[in-house]
Image: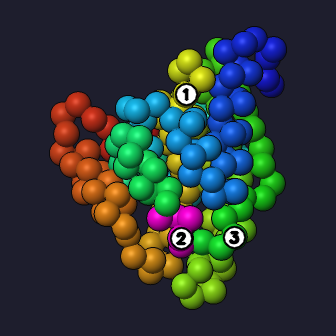
Amino acid sequence: MTSTGPTTRSTLETAREFIRAVEAKDIEAVADTLRDDVEQLFMHSNAVISDQGVAELVAGRRRGFCVADVSGREEVLGYTRGIFDKFEPLVWRNHRWTVNPDGREVFFLGTGDMVVARTGVPYRNTYLTRFDVTDGKIVRMAEYGNAMMYARLGVRPNRAEFRSLLRAVGRMFSLTRSSRSGR
């Protein structure tokens, strides 16, 4: 489904580099993929457990519910440092990539094969992440998965995560920001 245009290649390569850097716990490489005004949204959705649900999310026919809104490069990096500390290893299996026709959005589907570092509890959530990339840098990520599965782990949120949870609550009352679309 990928085309050979430079925009598509740059978008896909940027998204792949982000995933590679997170799995390697390489914060500098993560930082290199992000714009200063990047936004990372965490959208609760059980649609990721079926191929049909994933296809509906990719096509925009299905939505999630925003449970965290991480805003700005430093906050995204703060959140990322937190997951580096919380999970060992930090790996997704069964990578599947989809590039939309105009090449500006890339979708990554993967199943976590992680263990909570503090407790040794396995964590096997499936995620679909949409990457919006401009000029080779990520401007927005919308990650769809079962947020309740993550919440049940009982891992304490760091400062960046706590702010993002509060910001997501604010989206519910905002006249301009959607708590449903991942946009």
Gap in angstroms between the C-alphas marked 3 and 2: 10 Å
Q: What crowding class fits label 3: few (fewer than 14 Cα within 10 Å), some (14-19), or many (20 or more)? A: some
Q: Which residue is mark 2?
A: 85
Amino acid of disc 3: Pro
- Mark 2 Cα within 10 Å, few/some/many (few <14, many 20+)? some
**Residue type at mark 1?**
Lys
Q: Is residue 131 in view from this perspective?
A: yes
Magenta part mainly helix, strand or loop? helix
Q: Count residues near mark 1 (Cα–Cα under 10 Å), then give few for <14, some for 14-19, many for 20+.
A: many
Residue 163 in the image: state x and y as whole percent. 28, 57
- The mark nearer the N terminus, 3 or 1, is 3
> Which residue matches tag 3?
89
Residue 102 lies within the magenta run: no
Rounded to the nearest angstrom, the CA distance separating label 3 from label 1 is 26 Å
Q: Which residues are magenta?
A: 82-86
Residue at 65% x, 25% y is: 11
In the figure, is residue 114 to the left or right of 35? right
Residue 89 vertical placement versus 24 (above, below): below
Question: In the image as oriented, which residue stretches furthest toward the bottom?
Answer: 119
Q: Are marks 1 and 2 in contact (CB under 8 Å)?
A: no
First of labels 1, 2 by sequence position? 2
138 and 60: which one is in front? 138
Pinpoint residue 44: horizontal percent, then vertical percent.
47, 56
At mark 2, the secondary structure is helix
Q: Which residue is mark 1?
A: 137
